[in-house]
Image: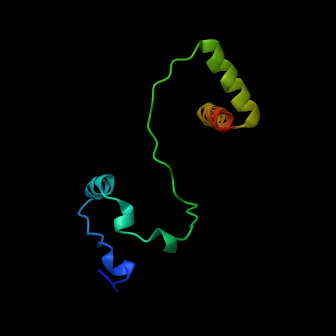
Amino acid sequence: MKGRSINHMKKRIPKFVSEDKEREYWAKQDSTEVLDWKKGKKVVLPNLKPSVKTISLRLPESMLEELKLLANKRDVPYQSLLKIYLSEKIEEELHMTKA
């Protein structure tokens, strides 16, 4: 291997027939064998929507009514306000554990 550049030693990324097959590949593949991360560039994907999962959540009726009242004051759906509150609390807790 003397004299060969690192780029020549990289594996090729295969063509995938589906996203599921691509996920399987990357779950088992060491990306450093395929990609040169030193050449990577940061990108902003403003229109990318995160994957969401529907859940069922039981709340006391009084809490739900208060949430709806607060959401109405801000003119946002109560589910959106709940996501904002959860996001803020999660971020706060994560920063506390890092400190």
Residue lying at the far left of the rendered structure: 17
Residue shown at 74% from the left, 36% from the top = 74
Give x and y (percent) for residue 51. Answer: 45, 46
Give x and y (percent) for residue 11. Answer: 29, 72
- In-image side of 49 versus 92 (left or right): left
Q: Quadrant of residue 35?
A: bottom left
Residue shown at 55% from the left, 60% from the top = 47
Q: How many marks?
A: 0
Which quadrant: the N terminus? bottom left
Residue shown at 65% from the left, 38% from the top = 98
Along the line of sight, which residue is nearer the eye, 65 or 10?
10
Colour setting: rainbow
Which quadrant: the C terminus? top right
Residue shown at 31% from the left, 54% from the top = 23
Along the line of sight, which residue is nearer the eye, 31 or 24?
31
- In-image side of 92 versus 50 (left or right): right
Give x and y (percent) for residue 55. Answer: 45, 29
Q: Is residue 90 above or below residue 10?
A: above
Give x and y (percent) for residue 45. Answer: 55, 62
Along the line of sight, which residue is nearer the eye, 24 or 85?
24
